[in-house]
Amino acid sequence: MASNNNNEEEKIRILLTLNNLQVEEIHYKNVQFARVWLTRFQARNALNNETLQDIVDGFTFLQTQFHLNVVVLGGKGKSFSAGADLKAKPGPKESTVREKRYNVQLGRRAIAAIENLEAITIARVQGHAAGGGFGLLQACDMRIVVENARLWFPEVDINLPLTWGLTARAIRDLGRAKAMELISMGNDLPVIDAYRLGLVNKIAKDEADLDIIIKDMVVTLGNKNASTLHFIKTHFKQLDNMVDLGRATDTDNDYLLYNRMLDASL
């Protein structure tokens, strides 16, 4: 039987456009889902304060889009996200310690905004997923990654602590020994190893294959009972909350980073 071409094509409606982020509603094969794009492609989607705030605002917006049970997070251009923008410094308008502290913790808030979304999230990863970009990948429920993507924590080589609660998440997702190796040595994590460790769900050959795999997953999820999916996501969130993700410990690292930023602004 010939397929219905109308059902094969994406129908896209833009729901929200921010400085460095766009939220789309996609209709595909009688299934609706959201696609969130990081759009700072000229900087490999590096995470400056503006982009991190966009992530917080975008995923907060999606909390009230109750008809969308699946959200795909991706990066425009050649990379998912190159991590924290090292060229960004506290601006002169940051007049108080509270404001500086708030900006330093924006990464933690962005990660939390993704993790707390009621919908099931899928990371669409190509190119670089470094540091904070690695954290965005971890914040999603499922992760589909192109085979030549680069996954790593570069912070040790630029004398920065790993913040945003990512150390505890690395231990949770990779095991203590592997997390220690990656964070302390700055080694790349080969995608095939990430798959074997359970960090990655599927490996794509290229971006075209990446989109095919994700659409198949979205269609499968879209044909499940929405209430059951909501229960499953809620159950996972509750179990995650039972695990100490090191939020208190990482406060020390956040504070160290704050002091470095403060010194740089003097």
Image (cartoon, rainbow, N blue to C red):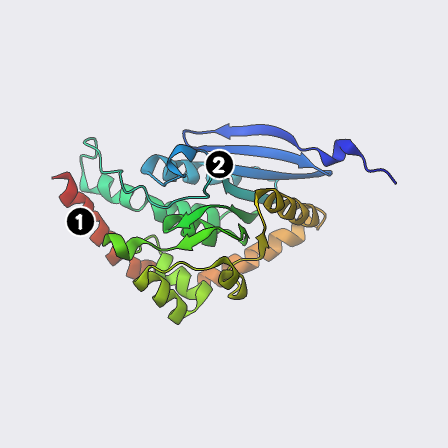
Please give the name of the residue rendered at 48% of the width and 36% of the height, measured from the top-left corner: 76
Residue kind at label 1, given as amino acid type: Asn
The residue at the far right in this view is: 1
* Residue 131, horizontal then vertical, whole percent: 36, 51
Please give the name of the residue rendered at 53% of the width and 58% of the height, measured from the top-left corner: 200
Mark 2 vs mark 1: give the one in front.
2
Residue 157 image-quadrant placement: bottom left
Please give the name of the residue rendered at 46% of the width and 63% of the height, measured from the top-left corner: 173
Q: Is residue 166 left or right of residue 3?
A: left
Whichever of callouts 2 and 1 sits on the residue coming sooner in the sequence is: 2
* Residue 198, horizontal then vertical, whole percent: 53, 63
The residue wearing badge 2 is 76
Query: Regarding mark 1 in the picture, which secondary structure is present there?
Result: helix
* Whether residue 243 is situated above or below residue 226 in the rendered picture: below
Instruction: Classify 10 Å Cα crowding around label 1: few (below 14), some (14-19), many (20 and above).
Output: some
Q: Nearer the viewer, residue 84 or 236?
A: 84
Please give the name of the residue rendered at 40% of the width and 39% of the height, measured from the top-left corner: 44
* Residue 161, horizontal then vertical, whole percent: 26, 56
Q: Is residue 40 visible?
A: no
Q: Is residue 58 visible?
A: yes
Q: Is residue 140 left or right of residue 220?
A: left
Residue 259 numbered tag: 1
Query: Regarding mark 2 in the picture, which secondary structure is present there?
Result: loop
**Quarter of the image where the N terminus is located:** top right
Residue kind at label 2, given as amino acid type: Lys
**Quarter of the image where the C terminus is located:** top left
**Alpha-carbon span between mark 2 and mark 1:** 33 Å
* Whether residue 54 is situated above or below residue 212 in the rendered picture: above
Q: Is residue 27 left or right of residue 168?
A: right
